[in-house]
Image (spheres, helix red, strand yellow):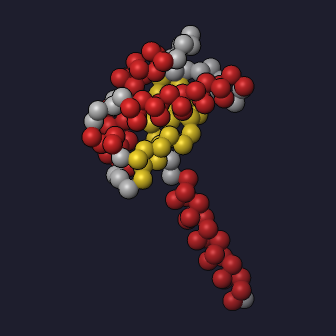
Amino acid sequence: MSYRSKKVASLLQEVVSEIIMHELNDPIFRQLITITEVKIGDDLKKAIIYFRVYKGKTEEVGKALNKAKGYIKKLMGEKITIKFMPDIEFRPDDRIEKEKKLEELFAKISKVKKKK
């Protein structure tokens, strides 16, 4: 990632978080939703926004966010001045679950090695 794309990703993360917290009226967005990361290509054409839902249904929130992405992009355009607003896509951040699975696998491997 270039310096510019990192700066734009950071800005998008901040603005999208504000939009979800303060400007979306759907009750599904009243849950605790965190934007954990924004990945954007060096050409700044597409942004993948990773989110996490605490004590809620991640799938439903993901569908609602992707359904509202046109409106979110419009609000982003009002708050950010850049030449091209990137297309956005929302994906659940499942890094913690993947880390837990890896830790479980490593624990199993270490148990097997200790038995030998």
Q: Is residue 3 depicted above or below 78 in this figure?
A: below
Where does the image place residue 86, in percent across and percent down from the top left? 51, 21
Residue at the (46%, 31%) spot, across then down: 18
What count of labels does the image hold? 0
Q: Is residue 22 depicted above or below 93 in this figure?
A: above
Q: Nearer the viewer, residue 54 or 89?
A: 54
Residue at the (43%, 44%) spot, across then down: 33
Outermost residue toward the front in this view? 22
Outermost residue toward the top in this view? 83
Where does the image place residue 39, in percent across and percent down from the top left? 58, 34
Query: Would residue 63 be seen by someone viewing this image from the given angle?
Result: no
Quick one: quadrant of the C terminus? bottom right
Query: Would residue 14 be seen by someone viewing this image from the given angle?
Result: yes
- The quadrant holding residue 99 is bottom right
Residue at the (61%, 24%) spot, across then down: 8
Q: Nearer the viewer, residue 103 or 23?
A: 23
Q: Nearer the viewer, residue 10 or 105?
A: 10
Residue at the (69%, 78%) spot, across then down: 110
Position of 51 with respect to 63 (left or right) is: right
Quick one: quadrant of the N terminus? top right
Where does the image place residue 67, in percent across and percent down from the top left? 32, 31
Where does the image place residue 74, in percent across and percent down from the top left? 40, 18
Q: Is residue 53 depicted above or below 88 in this figure?
A: below
Q: Nearer the viewer, residue 10 or 22?
A: 22
